[in-house]
Amino acid sequence: MTLSSITEPTDALADLLAGRLPDARGRFGPFGGRYVPETLIPALERLEEGVREHLRSPSFQQELAAQLTSWVGRPTALTFAGRLSERWGARVWLKREDLAHTGAHKINNAIGQALLARRLGAQRIVAETGAGQHGVASAAACARLGLPCTVYMGSIDMRRQAPNVDRMRLLGATVVAVSAGDATLRAAIDEALRDWVSDPFGTYYLLGSAVGPHPYPYLVRELQAVIGREARAQFLEQTGALPEAVIACVGGGSNSIGMFHAFLPEREVEIIGVEAGGRGEALGDNAATVSYGRPGVLHGTYSLLLQDADGQVQETHSVSAGLDYSGVGPEHAFLAHVGRVRYESAGDAQALEAVRALCEAEGILPALESAHAIAGAKRWAASHPGGSVIVCLSGRGDKDMPTLQQTLLKDEK
C-alpha cells in the first residue's frame, strides 16, 4: 500500500483543527491506533484515562506551568537572526528551544509526563533516547520529582553521544546499552517497551517523541505545543503579522509537531518539515520517512515506515542521532497525506554546512538535528527573497562535538 492509495474525507484537516482527531480509536485519519501486545492494553487504557482526567485539569496545568516557568525556563526566546538574514536575503527568526533547561525541547514533554506518571502512582520511569536529549530530560525530570529512571540507548548512539550519557548518569539515571538490532533509536524503543511489558502498572514508559501507540502521539503533541503557541505570539508581538513559513526538523517528530500545531489553522503560513536525507535516496542511506516511506506498523502505531518490498523495516542513516529513526509520528503522516505540511529532506553535508553557517553568523551552535531545519530554511530563503520564516532550533549542539570533531573539524588544527 502506498500513501497515495489511502483515501481520506476532504474535511479531515477540519476534524483535526476542531479537536476531533485523534478519534476514539486513537487515529489521525488512517494513521495511528494501538498495535501492542495484549499485556500492554490495560496500561495504555489506564494512561488514556489518566490523560483525560489530568491533562486539562486546572491543578495539573498549574503544576506544569510552574515547572515550565521556574525550572525549564519558559518562554524561550524568539531571536531574529540578523546576519544570517543578510546573507540569505530573507528574514529568519529562531525559536530558541536550545535555551530550555537541559538544552532542547525534550524537557517540555519529559516534565509533563513525569508529573502525569506521579499522579498515576508509578514507582519508576523507563525511557528511550537516540541523541541523548530525551534521556537527559527524562533523567532531570525524574530527579526533580524523586522518581527512579532507567534509560535505554543504542550502543552506536552511546558512542557518538558520549557527553549526554555522562549527563544522564550524573542526574541519577541508569543507562542501559542496547546492542541488538540497529543499535540506535529503534532498538532502544524496542527494549524500553520490553521493560514496560514486564511491569506495566508499577512502571511508566516516558516516550520521547510523537510516535508509539495511542495516546502517546496526542500526549506528546499536547505537551510540546507550547513551542508553537509561544512562537506565534512572540512573532505577532515583534512584527504585527504572521510569518510566511515555519520550518522544523522531523525524526519521530516531537519538536516539529509542537511547533506546527499553532500554525495549522493559518492557511497563509507555509509549514515545512525537514527530514534527514543522510547520504542519498537509497533505502538505508537516509532517515527521510515521509519522503521515501510506505504505510506500516512500527512501535505500536500505523504510520509511514522505511521498509523494503517485503515489509521489513530497514536500518537508517543520518549524521544526526536524533533523526535516525525508521518511522515518523502518525500525525505527521496524516498532515503529509492531507497536504497541510510539506516534507522534504536535507543531507548530511547540508546539515553540517548549516551548523557552520549558524555558528559563524549568529554565534549559536545548533544541534545536528536542528541544523537540518536551518538547511531547509536556507533553501526556502533562496526562493522567497525578503520573506519571513521561523525555524525551530530544537536543541543546542554541545552534545554533537564528538561528531563535529570527526567531520567539520577533522582537518583543522
Image (tube, grey):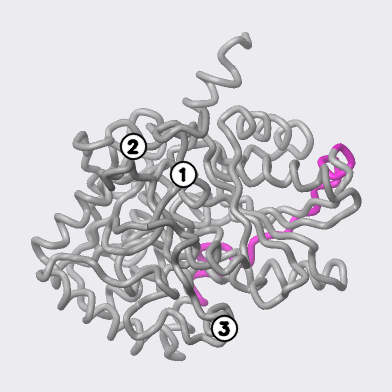
Using residue 357 as the reference point, say whether residue 224 is left or right of it. Answer: left
Q: Residue type at mark 3?
A: Asp
Determine which of the numbered discs, if any, sits on residue 323 in the image.
Answer: 1
Residue that carries the numbered disc 2 in the rendered image: 315
Work out how far the residue at label 1 is from the one at label 2, CA to CA, in angstroms: 12 Å
Determine which of the numbered discs, if any, sits on residue 11 in the image.
Answer: 3
**Residue 32 in view here:** yes
Determine whether 13 is above or below 314 in the image.
Answer: below
Q: Residues within 10 Å of mark 3 (few under 14, many from 20)?
A: few
Q: Secondary structure at mark 3?
A: loop
Mark 3 touches mark 2? (CB < 8 Å): no
Report the span colored magenta. Answer: 65-87
x, y (%) of residue 135? 36, 50
Residue depth check, mark 1 versus mark 3: number of the one nearer the observer: 3
Q: Residue type at mark 2?
A: Glu
Q: Residue at coordinates 87% horizontally, 67% vertically from top-left?
A: 239
* Res. 260 image quadrant: bottom right
Work out how far the residue at label 3 is from the one at label 2, CA to CA, in angstroms: 35 Å
Residue depth check, mark 1 versus mark 2: number of the one nearer the observer: 2
x, y (%) of residue 272? 65, 56
Q: Residue type at mark 1?
A: Leu
